[in-house]
Amino acid sequence: MIRLLLVDDHAVVREGYRRLLERRGDLTIVAEAGAANEALEAFRREKPDVVVLDLALPDMGGVELIGRIKARDADARILAFSMHREPLFAAQALKAGALGYVTKSSEPSVLVQAVYKVAAGSRVLSPDIAPELAMALLDETPDPLRELSPREFEVLRMLLDGESHDAIGQRLSISPKTVQNYHYQIKTKVGAQNDMDLARIAARHGLID
């Protein structure tokens, strides 16, 4: 029996893929969480074989959550299940420690098979993003956002959402001063002179519309 933890802030979505996954006799949902902190507690309590998580969570981003789960258990097997089809999101999730990345636009069977592959310790990408990610990794054109660490990536996403240093610090359990340092490092890494410049670069790479 493969024991799963589902992490998504939409209860209706969780119910949908709970039903999908539990149709298989050897998959069982041992816990659900609607936020990252709930997920960390459920992971500690249940020790699931596979964590299936969304990247958009209300308290901290899924990429940050992946990193925190891996910090608690280096052998944790994590499958990111996200609406984002931009290769950058998949690359950051994998860099943070996820074994797989499946988009929510995939066929249901793709998610099911990805769970089995991740449970077995294999890497997996949904077919709709695998070629794009491969091309992005092969592309020698400089991509400054690709060089960001998972933590820097999450801080950038929150900055782009208009959150203050204080708010970001509360969500990530770090000081506003640390967030300010990340903000400066991000601008330096991507070559942005100011926040308007940073937003333009993020838009050019598909992080914002």
Image: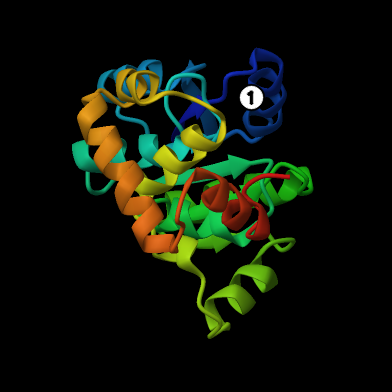
Q: What residue appears at the point 21 percent right and 41 percent down from the top-left corner?
A: 71
- Look at the image and tell me whether residue 47 can be seen: yes
- Give the quadrant of the N terminus: top left
Give the x, y percent position of residue 113: 63, 52
Camera-nearest residue between 85 and 52: 85
Residue drawn at x 72%, y 24% is: 16
Quarter of the picture holding the C terminus = top right
How many residues crowd mark 1 within 10 Å: few (<14), some (14–19), many (20+)? some
Instruction: Name the residue at 61% across, 69% down.
Output: 133
- Residue name at image x 64 percent, y 33 percent: 21
Q: Is residue 139 above or below residue 50?
A: below
Work out whether residue 92 or residue 157 is closer to the camera in this orientation and state it. Answer: 157
Kind of residue at disc 1: Arg
Left or right, residue 130 beside residue 138 = right
Image position, residue 56 (x, y; %): 56, 31
Using the rendered view, name the quadrant where residue 11 is placed.
top right
Determine which residue is flagged by label 1.
18
In the displayed structure image, the side of residue 75 where residue 209 appears, left or right: right
Query: x%, y% of residue 154?
Result: 43, 40
